Structure formats: C-alpha cells, structure tokens
Amino acid sequence: MYNLAINLYSLAAKADALFSKKVKTMLNGQRDCYEVLRSKIEPGRRYLWFHAASLGEFEQGRPLMERIRQDYPAYGILLTFFSPSGYEVRKNYEGADVICYLPFDKPKNVRRFLDLANPCMAFFIKYEFWKNYLDELHNRNIPVYSVSSIFRPQQPFFKGYGKDYAKVLCDFNHLFVQNEKSKDLLKGIGIDAVSVAGDTRFDRVLQIRQQAKDLPLVEAFKQGKLTFVAGSSWQPDEDLFIEYFNHHPEIKLIIAPHVIGEDHLQQIIAKLEGKAVRYTQATLDNVADARCLIIDCFGLLSSIYRYGEIAYIGGGFGSGIHNTVEAAVYGVPVIFGPNHQRFMEANDLIECGGAFSINDGNDLKELLDKLLSDRTFLLESGNKAGTYVHSRAGATDIILKYLKGLL
C-alpha cells in the first residue's frame, strides 16, 4: 500500500508539473540529483547525510550540522531537500559539501541514491519518515537518527490502521524528540530508543539573534516610536491589523508579507492610510515620516523583529502559523491567529504569558489596547516570551553528547 501511494504521489506530481513551475523544478532537481552525487561525492570520504523536507526543517537541523562540521571536520556533509522552497534558497549553503534534491521514496530510487551517496550516518529532521529510505538504511547497517521530532496521538503511528507503518520507527537507531509526551507515545508502541532533547530550532534562533543585522533604513523609519512588526502575514491577518493601525497613528507598522508579489503588495498599500514605503524603494530621507514600511524582499525578517515592541505572526487564519520563536527571542509579546494547536512552542508561549491568540478583529483590538495602554503588561509579556526561548536552548548539546562516541 505504501509503495502504491508513493507511485500515485509521483504520478500526481508529474501531472502538476505541467502547470506548476515549482513542481517542475522539484522533478528536474530529483532527476539531476544522481549526477550531482556522482560528480561531487569524493571516493573514500565518509559522509554524514542530513535530510530536511524544506527550509524550516533545514534551519531546525542547522545548529547540529554546523556543530558536527566544526567538531568533526573530517566528515563530509551531504544535505538533501524535498521541496524547492528549501533547495532553491540554500543550494549554495557553505556548510555542506554536497547539496541536492531527494528523489521520491521508490525502492529503485532509494537503492540508486544510497549506492552513490553511501553515507556512514543519516539524520532526518522532524517529520521525515520515508519508509523505503529508512528500511534500506537499516538493511545496510547505516545508523539513522530522527532530530527534533514531535509526535501526537492523531498521527497514523498511534492508530489501529497505522500499525504496519509504525514499524518504520524501528529503523531509527535513536529518536531525539522535543517533549516527554512524544517519548510516552513512542513507548506505548514499543519504541524505547528515545531521548527528550528539545528542539534545535531554539538554538538556531539564538544564533540568529546574535548574528542579527543592523538595518539603518529600519532604524530611520522607527524614529524611536512604538513599532508593530507583522511577519509572514497573509491577507486575513493583514485585514485585521491594518484596520487597527489605520486608527492609531501613534504607532508605526512594519509588514513582511509571506507572499511578495506585486498584486499582493498593491493590495496592502491600498488598505493603508498614511504614507507607506517599500523597503526596496526606501531611503533614509523618505522613510523617516512614513507610517508603514513594507518589506518587499527576503532575508531580513529575523533581524527586523528586533526593532519591534510587539510582533504578529501570520498564518493563523490559514493552514497554520509561521515561526513564533524567531520573534519571541527578542523579548517581545507575540500575537497570532487561532490555528496554532499543532505548534508546541506557540501553545507554550501562550501558557507562559508571552503570546496571545486572537479569533477576530475585536480580539486584536482589545489586546492591542491593553498592550499599548499598560506599559508594565507590555514589558512583562515580552520578558516572558524571551525567557521561554532562552530556557529551551541546548538540544544540540544533548544530541552531540549522545553521538560523541559514535562519530
């Protein structure tokens, strides 16, 4: 059944490629990966294979990858992606020796890939459970580890119909999970090679904070005023906070939309009252009296959060919120929409008082009115968010301590 599902998935992707540039790019990358491996894998060198589905998982596994590269430089690093949103952004990442796409999880593809890559150890980040790859790694006696994985009762592994698929978890030599609940769930199906290490993403956001860029244009825009930063926003998010912003000229607004397309940018500008400037068109002179700064380029959001007193994370009125800890690390309260239940760190932030979930514009107005009028509440909420992130650091060290005698 699994192989049938993978074949159907592959056929559907080929059909989608006729209409989707992104899917076509992925399929072309999968086709070319064998030549990449053939030309770049050095015979005789031992490689550690890190697999990340997309950009978020890459950033999650990055602290471990970079620490291993630093502490064990003799190993080569092979990095694979499944999604173009990961590969196309990080294909020139200097922390890996070989970077390519991972082909579909078909037995023939798996054998061909592993024959060429021949890793001595593999690390799958978070939700990656490709059965044929894991089975073949196990059969070849290649140790494989799950990093920053998290498990929930709703997953197939813990349902009657998913008993056969759950056997794939036995292929892992060890699973480094984010919380005790995950460990307990795995123990309930007989998986005991588990350690609660936490989430390496907290280590990564602390790295990012230390490396945050100074942005003179944002500093000139801020002018020392209270600033609301909206990151990875979608249209339903924007409708809410722009409405509030239009009635509160005392605050400044920075919007970094998830989709940076001309149509979407023009829609945002049309909703705003007061002067708005796009980052790529900004100068030190024209941003000073602007009320809104629109970030119409990539790579700046993680540094921009440092300039805000309040952060809003988009996606909560859609399929799910984006990265909350990227903002919380700066010690600012975080706001997002109702679809956050699947995100442990978002729920933890709410519980500790560092984040707030809203359901509509009235909720947002009530919350922002309180944050803006009660300075103590604002500062205490931000401090709780920052403390939460710092308290969760250290997953990379826990994993490396376990691997020390194996590398």
Image: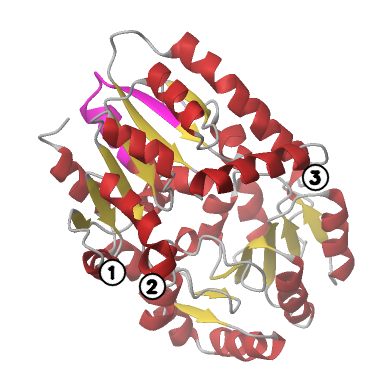
The secondary element bearing badge 3 is classed as helix
Near-viewer residue (398 or 268): 398
Taking 388 as reference, is 213 above or below it?
Answer: above
For label 1, the SS is helix
Which label's residue is closer to the chain start, 1 or 3?
Answer: 1
Q: Residue at x 70, y 72 (%)?
A: 237
Mark 2 and mark 1 residues within 8 Å of each other at the beta carbon: yes
Q: Is residue 8 toward the left or the right of residue 151 in the image?
A: right
Range shown magenta:
64-79
Judged by depth in the image, the label closer to the viewer, 1 or 3, is 1
Q: Secondary structure at mark 2?
A: loop
Numbered tag placed on residue 185 in the rendering: 1
Label 1: how many residues lie within 10 Å, few (<14), some (14-19) or many (20+)? some
Q: For residue 143, what is the image quadrant?
A: top left
Residue ID for mark 3: 281
For residue 403, the mark is: none
> Is 268 on the left-hand or right-hand side of 227?
right
Whole-angstrom CA distance, mark 2 to mark 1, is: 7 Å
